[in-house]
Image: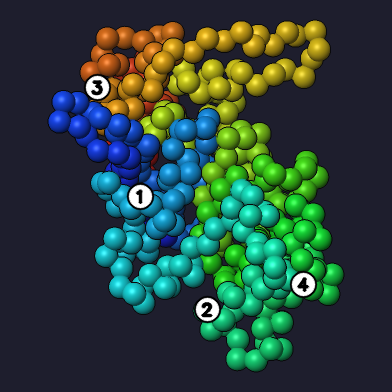
């Protein structure tokens, strides 16, 4: 059996400390999250959900920016917890990131070529200036840019789309196996959004680069995602094939989320008078049952006492809801909650 590219096993992140008389200021940001990305073929795996669902926490755990409270992240058979200095250096080369804000990652006092020069120097990728320039030009060509047009400019002289494409080029230049893309198209307009998404698809298909695509935008997830994990307050509510889930959601939260998208018809009124209950209290404990309980129209007593497992809706479609307790429980490691 081929070793997976990335395995996330029961990843849990709890912020704060438990107090002597209760939970104190403890917040469960991510709970028992599991995911497997194969070595081949490359995949675009989407992590979706509203703000505060744990998407960025998951990205930080994978990148090693945030320590795990429990569980493990394993890259090509090696836990990132126990990597040697050499292994971690290689991990940092093979797992790259593209952030949401294409401006904040640049130093405004340097020309934009500085971001490429730093990568080449840190990873010792070239022995002379010509070799380095060739590497940069190749990476820029992948995202539809030319060095002579952009490298000598300062960040403020480029559009947001240009800055973001350059960050994709910088990541690609290292020939990584995984790119964590954290809301990479939320700050660019529609035409450039389509271009960046197309670049991601081409890197997947032509370069065998997988993506962990973090987003709240289900339309872009539908366009490019192979698999999707729908998060609510750090827990997986539904996962599987992206098209199946968005076209036929099963979990009440996912149904509400997709149903809240306004219909492009001026005759259809969009009700904005929504009052939500205070459901943050359920984030204070890891074992608090279904976190969607306060907002769910189908809630049951058992939802408060035990977290529902993922039930099999169909092939490559799983939902964590007791409404489907007559369905078989999924026993796939890649989707176990």
Looking at the image, which residue is at 51% across and 46% down?
A: 45
- Earlier in the chain: of badge 3 and badge 1, it is 1
Between the C-alphas of marks 3 and 4, the distance is: 55 Å
Q: Position of residue 299 (x, y in %)?
A: 36, 10
Q: As rendered, which of 239 and 327 lies closer to the eye?
A: 239
Q: Is residue 8 left or right of residue 226?
A: left
Q: Nearer the viewer, mark 3 or mark 2?
A: 2
Which residue is depicted at the point 49% across and 70% down?
Answer: 93
- Residue at disc 1, secondary structure: strand
Q: Is residue 308 visible?
A: no
* Res 151 label: 4
Precedes in sequence: disc 3 or disc 4: 4
Which SS class for mark 4? loop
Quadrant for the N terminus in the image: bottom left
Q: CA distance from mark 1 to mark 2?
A: 28 Å
Distance CA(mark 4)–CA(mark 1): 37 Å
State whether residue 235 is above or below residue 153. above
Q: Quadrant of the C terminus?
A: top left
Judge the density around disc 4: few (<14), some (14-19), many (≥20) Cα neighbours within 10 Å: some
- Front one among 108 and 153: 108
Looking at the picture, how far across and down is residue 56, in whole percent? Answer: 48, 44
Residue indicated by mark 3 = 306
Q: Secondary structure at mark 2?
A: helix
Q: Earlier in the sequence, mark 1 or mark 2?
A: 1
| First in residue order: circle 4 vs circle 1 | 1
């Amino acid at each position: 059996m081929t070793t997976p590219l990335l395995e996330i096993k029961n990843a849990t992140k709890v912020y704060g400390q438990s107090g002597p008389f209760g939970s104190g200021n403890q917040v469960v940001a991510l709970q028992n999250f599991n995911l497997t990305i194969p070595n081949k073929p490359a995949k675009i795996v989407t992590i979706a959900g509203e703000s505060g669902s744990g998407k960025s926490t998951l990205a930080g755990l994978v990148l090693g920016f945030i320590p795990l409270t429990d569980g493990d992240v394993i890259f090509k058979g090696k836990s990132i917890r126990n990597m040697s200095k050499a292994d971690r250096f290689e991990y940092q080369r093979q797992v790259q990131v593209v952030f949401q804000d294409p401006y904040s990652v640049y130093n405004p006092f340097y020309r934009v070529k500085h971001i490429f020069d730093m990568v080449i120097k840190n990873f010792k990728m070239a022995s002379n200036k010509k070799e380095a320039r060739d590497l940069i030009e190749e990476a820029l060509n992948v995202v539809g840019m030319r060095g002579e047009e952009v490298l000598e400019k300062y960040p403020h002289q480029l559009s947001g789309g240009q800055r973001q494409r350059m960050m994709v080029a910088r990541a690609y230049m290292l020939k990584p196996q995984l790119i964590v893309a954290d809301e990479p198209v939320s700050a660019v307009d529609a035409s450039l959004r389509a271009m960046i998404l197309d670049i991601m698809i081409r890197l997947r298909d032509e370069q065998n680069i997988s993506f962990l695509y973090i987003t709240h935008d289900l339309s872009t997830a539908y366009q490019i995602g192979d698999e999707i994990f729908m998060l609510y307050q750090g827990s997986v509510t539904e996962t599987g094939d992206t098209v199946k889930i968005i076209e036929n959601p099963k979990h009440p939260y996912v149904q509400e989320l997709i149903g809240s998208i306004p219909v492009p018809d001026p005759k259809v009124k969009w009700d904005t008078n929504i009052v939500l209950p205070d459901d943050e209290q359920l984030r204070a404990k890891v074992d608090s049952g279904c976190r969607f309980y306060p907002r769910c129209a189908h809630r049951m007593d058992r939802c408060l006492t035990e977290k529902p497992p993922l039930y099999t809706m169909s092939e490559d479609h799983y939902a964590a809801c007791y409404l489907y307790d007559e369905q078989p429980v999924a026993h796939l490691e890649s989707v176990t909650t």
